Image (spheres, helix red, strand yellow):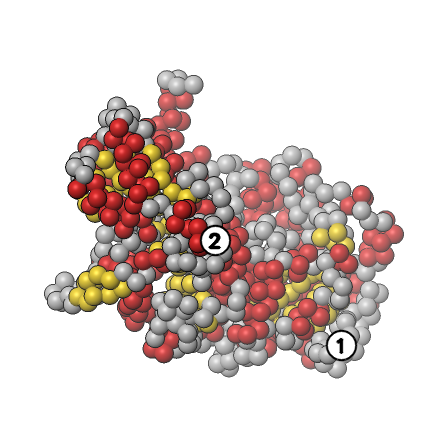
Amino acid sequence: MTQPDVLDTVQLLTPEGTRVADHRYDPRVAHLDPAALRELYADMVLTRRFDTEATALQRQGELGLFTPSLGQEGAQVGSAHALAPQDYVFPAYREHGVLHVRGLDLTDVLKQFRGVDHGGWDPAEHRVHLFTLVVGAHPLHAVGYAMGVQRDGDVATGDPNRDTAVIAYFGDGATSQGDVSEALTFAAVNQAPVVFFVQNNQWAISVPTSGQTRVPLVQRGVGFGIPSVQVDGNDPLACYAVTAEALDRARNGGGPTFIEAVTYRMGAHTTSDDPLRYRDAAEVAAWRAKDPIDRLRRYLADAGELPQQFLDDLDARAEELAVHVRDTVHAMTPPPAESMFDHVYATPHSLVDAERAWFRDYESALEDGSVR
Amino acid sequence: MTTMADRTDATTTVPTEKLTLARALTLGMRTALRHDPSVLLMGEDIGRLGGVFRVTDGLQAEFGPDRVVDTPLAESGIVGTAIGLAMRGYRPVCEIQFDGFVFPAFDQITTMLAKLHARSLGRITVPVVIRIPYGGGIGAVEHHSESPEVLFAHTAGLRVVSPATPADAYTMIQEAIASPDPVIFLEPKGRYWDKAEVALTPYGTPGAGLDKARVVRPGADLTVVAYGPTVHTALRAAEVAAEEGTSLEVIDLRTISPLDHDTVVESVRGTGRCVVVHEAAVSHGVGAEVAARVTEECFFELEAPVLRVGGYHTPYPPSRLEHHYLPSVDRLLDAVDRAMAV
């Protein structure tokens, strides 16, 4: 039987914050000095602050919905830190930590949840695609994009500023979608430069991972002939290391990699969900003890690398972010109604043009009172 | 983007060749592949085999396996990866082997391909062409004779077109490839072997456009609206009707989204009568849309209700029965008679 590329779950930091030696992956993190690790820590803290603020805004009625990433900051921030500027990200709808690391203003994520547009940002600016709520549809786009990278010759040139990898983020639930299997197939037969980063957060809304698979998800990749690795998804250092290795493999022409990051969705699926209906407090408590932010804080603190000034500054940054999120969301107003006719097509379409004209006439007639 | 008109070389003498509709498509794609390195074809068995209808015959030999790609047998995968390739700057042309096999890709087409331009506020364009051999009359097995055009026409963001002649096949496939919008390109497989002279215009020669219908036979008494495989049926019916003293005007819609209502309405204003004919089921179909629009725009010029001729609200029947299901010349003429009798 084909085995995963690495047999044991990769872990470099225990939940207590103790560094574990790993012959294969230590070199991948050797260059991360205390300052770099503090940035990793800061990005997780800021992501969580965003999460708290957006959840509060939904509770206040300012957002229609929100998808918290609470608990998954280690998998997201750790993996995203391994990306190069030229790499391209295809996220699902809970990847706030990834988006933050890529430099997006996270309030862009909230435009959709505020109901003012379906997209939110320019994908080209940070090389981060828009997410949709159709679970599992986007890994195919990532593979197609990676096939384009291959055809452009931007793989295995040896130029670190040119060689390009693509990464697709999705969850345990998405692995049941046929499109994900097709994405793995197309990636494998084309040896496309793509990394599949699965956050197994244990729950697809109310259905546990055992309702999606009879084998560890990491073996899904193996079955397609794709090097596969399982990582402690609440260990940001290990997530960084396995992702860095996978991205290098992709950029060097070694083809795709499948990563299963074992993590936990500490909060609800969305703000409309009620996890108390389907899971135990004890389970949540057990995972809280493995929190990704706590473990990196313990590690840095034990090493004497967490000065109070840094923590105070980080508190200030987090508060600044929260104020920015609040103010920006409050200021988000709907676009003009007629904008629904914009960009349906890239070139003129007579039906859309005619309906736009009709709509404009009707709306202006409403205003002057000539129709009801 | 360079428009097709920018690349026209008006001084060249245009050669013509007698081609089947299928071969005209091949040469249209070959021209696009030769002139635009971002064009690539993808689909099942389109490489060495040349596709089950041989429409891509010889193209992999000329352009190689990276541009004429034999994909895994997975329609959603074909369209999904085509979307990613388009985001990277490519212009993929996907072949779906048969109409009845497009549905695994339906989600990618309707929730992703059709909506990405709008979702991104115009920042992303997805110039993907999806070629689908469609329609019946070839004695095929189940799922090989269907007409799914309305499912796509009902989805904003997609253009849906269908050539009826070799000449249109040659130019429309090139216009579809050049379009920045996704195009569902429906090929009337029952007419793949029809032959006609085709002007092999250079790549970029402006054609009739992807948004215009065409009057293919002028007439005075009644307008027959057809597209794809039924244009041929309508023209044959017009000949029979002419012998019987009824003058039919035949319109080839060419495009279903957008639908060129102006051409239809102008015709019906002249004739006062209209029959729409397509192989797809009549209920909720293109005929219903045309009838509604004609009624709105020509209510006082109409001499008779707009009638529809087409398939029934049944699964496509076994092939030994398909001649009962498909709109024949006789069934079309029966509708003409009913409209003329009012």
For residue A353, which quarter of the picture? Answer: top left
Where residue A111 appears, as percent x and y from the top left, is: 55, 44
Q: Secondary structure at mark 1?
A: loop
Q: Of residues B141 and B128, which is closer to you in this image?
A: B141
* Quarter that holds the N terminus of chain A: bottom right
State left or right for residue A223 relative to residue B62. Answer: right
Residue A242 pos. (x, y %): 68, 72
Q: Quadrant of residue B243?
A: top left
Chain ID for label 2?
B
> Can marks 2 and 1 be said to lie on one chain?
no
Residue A211 as seen in the image, left or right of residue B195: right
Q: Residue at x 27, y 64 (%)?
A: B20
Q: Residues within 10 Å of mark 1 (few under 14, many from 20)?
A: few
Q: Is residue A166 above or below residue A172?
A: below
The reply to whether residue A322 is in sight is yes
Foreground residue, A51 or B125? B125
Dot 2 alpha-carbon crowd within 10 angstroms: few under 14, some 14 to 19, many 20 or more: some
Furthest-front residue in this view: B320
Residue at the spot 82% in from the left edge and 49% down from the top edge = A279
**What amino acid does circle 2 point to?**
Pro
Q: Is residue B102 visible?
A: no
Q: Secondary structure at mark 2?
A: loop
The dot on residue B301 is: none
Which of these two is toward me, B315 or A8? B315
**Residue A327 on image: x %, y %:** 59, 40
Chain at tag 1: A
**Residue denoted by label 1:** A7
Report whether A176 appears left or right of A264.
left
Q: Amino acid at mark 1?
A: Leu
Instruction: Say which residue label 2 marks.
Output: B318
Task: Estimate the x, y position of residue B214 in percent, counting from the top left.
Answer: 23, 46
